[in-house]
Image (spheres, rainbow, N blue to C red):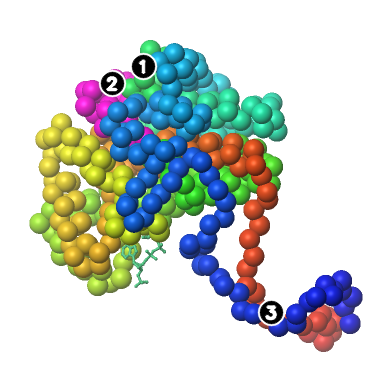
Amino acid sequence: MTERIVNPDYVAEPEKMNVKKGLDGAVIDTTSISKVTPDTSSLVYRGYPVQELAENCKFEEVAYLLYNGELPTKAQLAEFEKTERGYREITKANLEVIRMLPKKCHPMDSIRTGVSFLGCEDTRIWDKTSNLDKAMMMLSKIPTMVAADYRFKKGLDFIPPNPNLSFAENFFHMCFGKVPDAKVVRAFDVSLTLYAEHSFNASTFTTRVVTSTESDIYSATVAGIGALKGPLHGGANEQVMHMMIEIADPAKAEQWMKDALAQKRKVMGFGHRVYRYGDSRVPTMKKYAQVMADVTGEQKWMKMYDALEKTMVAAKKIHPNLDFPAGPAYYMMGFEIDFFTPIFVMARTTGWSAHVIEQANNNRIIRPLSEYIGAPERHVKPMSER
Ligand code: COA
């Protein structure tokens, strides 16, 4: 018989476990970074409603708020922007790593690799007291890496960051070599605020799990990028646009949706684990997607948006999530579809880092249980008897 160390209070037949598939409804820690209230479809960052932040602040202020807990004063914002702009350049070696990646690899794989390389370059990797500084470095350098990948994939030269431009303006500059109309920059900036943070979503939870082992912030961010890439999470903003292109004509949207539901297809950009009556971020993002339609003069996507939403809500009472308006908004800004989720990374790195810092400052390793449903206990037979 196998030797064992047995708890004297051991009960041979434990009661069936209460499995929370997908951690549905499980509250696993406290946080003071953000709160989602499903009944009122509300989301607050550090107490501030996200819609108010999007309409009244620029993304840099929101990043400061997430990292520091308070909105910045004028002087604090100036200092923060100086640091952010000062960190934008990446090393030649990092640029070369991005240049050498296979042209066909997904930009999410490029940015995952770029952040991993950034961790290799930082000699303070194990020092958690420098996490805020590392968070600032990622905030500043991730857009440079994403834009470099954007240019290399098109066979174009790298455009270095411009420290005289805001975070949003600089990204357009590095991708396209010019800064568009202020309305376009504003729509983009709003999307970054809306994407910045969302409590214990799958990728943020991933970063917290990695941090809970006392691993480093770069490893946590790399893991977060991996989780965000999936189409059930951040990858949905790309799938929304592929779907809209597949539908092609707003007049066909209603029937397309009915067919998709009849085939029990998951329609990207709809539904949410926590929100049941709609996603608090959607009205603001829809407003700015409409701004993009007006700027470009292309109303097709917004007409399709309305037809898809109406049909889905009538049939299943399932509402759009943020990825639904963000997809066409980014498309109308001129970005390639497979760069939509890397843009999400540029924003969400702020929320991830805030959670990494919170987890590291009050840590207990995250280690849930599972109910075993495999073979009952059996014993190893010698090879000749198997
Ligand atoms: N399209 C079609 N049906 C959907 C749906 C969608 N987008 N989202 C949910 N449903 C259906 C489910 O299939 C399920 O149906 P069933 O009871 O017949 O099995 C029912 O609605 C309830 O699903 P729910 O428990 O709310 O889903 P979840 O919490 O397991 O998953 C998502 C949440 C977000 C992963 C899911 O809604 C989804 O896959 N959405 C599309 C991807 C997406 O937009 N992701 C971005 C999220 S911000």
For ligand 1, tell me if the residue under mark 1 lies within 8 Å. Answer: no
- Identity of the residue drawn at 40% across and 49% down: 36
The first of marks 2 and 1 along the sequence is 1
Query: Who comes first in sequence, dot 3 or dot 2?
Result: 3
Q: Quadrant of residue 378?
A: bottom right
Quarter of the rendered image showing ligand 1: bottom left
Q: Give left or right: position of 186 versus 138.
A: left
In the image, the segment drawn in magenta is 172-194
Residue at image mark 3: 14
Is residue 177 shown in magenta? yes
Residue 322 can be seen in this image = no
Q: Main secondary structure of the magenta part?
A: helix
**Mark 1 vs mark 3: in front:** 3
Measuring 24% from the left and 72% from the top, which residue is drawn there?
Answer: 262
Q: Where residue 118 sits in the image (x, y, percent)?
A: 59, 30
User: Which residue is label 1 attached to?
Assistant: 165
| Position of residue 43 measured from the top left corner of the image (x, y, whole percent) | 37, 45
Closer to the camera in the image, 78 or 218: 78
